[in-house]
Image (cartoon, helix red, strand yellow):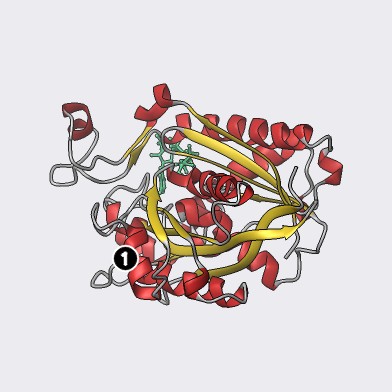
């Protein structure tokens, strides 16, 4: 159909300098390094200073990705930001980032598919590029989750961190890039993970401490069960749609929510540890930034070879899930 593929041309990340270790959390609440490590696999997370807007992380990640792709900000046609923690509802995070990186010719909008945001954004970018409408799309997954956490709630606060990951998407050689993708939403399960914004229901209030009405709340075990099923199913769908088996996959880059979720899905998929990118021990759950940050780490480690089949897979609030299979062509 086309004489080109659509793939990742460059990646960039930003992790704030300040970190919060399990030992720090032990001093803040009734928890332990042992519990957190055994139940989640996490050891530390990065936290952005309170006085900085979250978009500062995305700006740095975007600049790196643009450099890595060997283009200039003027080449960017569209900026898509995925975030659950916009600094403002208006201007959008994508417009804030546009301003700071001087991508003056770009259109810009935010999407919200929670932790699945990056997979959704990749699929959106692919459509724009395949049709020839745009040439270069910048995706920035920009998450400042420390801002929507109740630091007295040990069920959630130990899990999340701040980070941004960015990629430039554009034309690659035919046969490379995104080959298959699958997006799904389950709105009827949305009550299992909520972050109220402009409206707070009585139900939302009752789930939270007073004055903490707009913090993240989740039913951990419901989301846990959904996550393993959704990640397994979404991965299988894109691999089978491409006419491949798990044996053909070089690396799975999953959303980093809990090592037990990743291992649970890997077991069902008969996937060995060396084929899974895991970074959550150093980052915690960074929502939609998980996949682009893990991708960047894998690229820097030389784990992504031209022609490798890579599966990115995520689940999250909404509830949502999705996967994309790509042939690495950077
Ligand atoms: O990207 C966002 C999507 N969200 C997720 O992916 C979350 C998915 N869920 C999970 O990752 C897990 O359900 C959690 C990590 C949130 C919880 O782990 P769990 O193994 O499901 O623990 P639990 O909620 O069943 O709690 C077991 C026990 C409870 O004590 P009792 O009732 O058995 O006495 C909790 O009170 O562990 C206790 N507990 C803790 N203990 C020490 C809960 N949190 C903590 C804690 N430190 N931080």
x%, y% of residue 202?
16, 28
- Determine which residue is flagged by label 1: 96
User: Can see residue 155?
Assistant: yes
Which residue is pictured at 59% across the width and 32% down the height?
A: 230
Name the secondary structure under disc 1.
helix
Which residue is pictured at 49% across the width and 61% down the height?
A: 77
Res 87 quadrant in image? bottom left
Q: Considering only vertical position in the picture, is 259 above or below 194? A: below
Quarter of the image with the C terminus in it? bottom right
Which residue is pictured at 81% across the width and 56% down the height?
A: 308
x%, y% of residue 176?
77, 54
Tell me if 279 is positioned left or right of 146 in this view: right
Which residue is pictured at 65% across the width and 44% down the height?
A: 324
x%, y% of residue 68?
61, 75
Q: Residues within 10 Å of mark 1 (few under 14, many from 20)?
A: many
User: Can see residue 285?
Assistant: no
Q: Nearer the viewer, residue 8 or 27?
A: 8
Q: Nearer the viewer, residue 112 or 234?
A: 112
Quarter of the image with the N terminus in it? top right
Q: Considering only vertical position in the picture, is 65 above or below 92? A: below
| Mark 1 CB within 8 Å of ligand 1 | no
């Amino acid at each position: 159909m086309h004489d080109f593929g659509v793939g990742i041309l460059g990646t960039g990340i930003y992790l704030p300098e300040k970190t919060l270790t399990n030992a720090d959390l032990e001093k803040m609440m009734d928890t332990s390094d042992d519990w957190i490590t055994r139940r989640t696999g996490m050891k530390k997370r990065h936290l952005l200073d309170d006085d900085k807007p979250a978009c500062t992380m995305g700006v740095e990640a975007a600049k790196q990705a643009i450099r890595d792709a060997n283009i200039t900000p003027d080449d960017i046609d569209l900026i898509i930001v995925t975030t659950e923690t916009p600094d403002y509802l208006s201007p959008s995070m994508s417009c804030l980032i546009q301003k700071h990186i001087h991508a003056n010719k770009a259109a810009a909008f935010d999407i919200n598919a929670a932790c699945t945001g990056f997979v959704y954004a990749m699929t959106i970018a692919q459509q724009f590029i395949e049709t020839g409408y745009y040439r270069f799309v910048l995706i920035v997954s920009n998450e400042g989750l420390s801002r929507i956490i109740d630091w007295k709630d040990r069920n959630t606060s130990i899990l999340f961190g701040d980070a941004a990951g960015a990629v430039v998407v554009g034309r690659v050689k035919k046969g490379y890039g995104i080959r298959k993708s699958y997006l799904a939403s389950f709105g009827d399960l949305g009550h299992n993970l909520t972050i109220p914004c402009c409206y707070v229901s009585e139900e939302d209030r009752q789930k939270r401490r007073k004055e903490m009405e707009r913090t993240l709340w989740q039913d951990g075990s419901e989301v846990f069960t959904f996550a393993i099923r959704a990640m397994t199913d979404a991965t299988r769908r894109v691999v089978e749609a491409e006419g491949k088996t798990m044996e053909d996959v070089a690396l799975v880059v999953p959303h980093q929510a809990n090592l037990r979720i990743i291992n649970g899905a890997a077991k069902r998929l008969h996937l060995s540890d060396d084929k899974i990118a895991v970074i959550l021990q150093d980052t915690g759950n960074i929502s939609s930034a998980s996949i682009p940050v893990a991708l960047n780490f894998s690229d820097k480690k030389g784990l992504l070879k031209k022609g490798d089949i890579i599966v990115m897979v995520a689940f999250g609030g909404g509830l949502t899930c999705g996967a994309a299979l790509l042939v690495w062509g950077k």
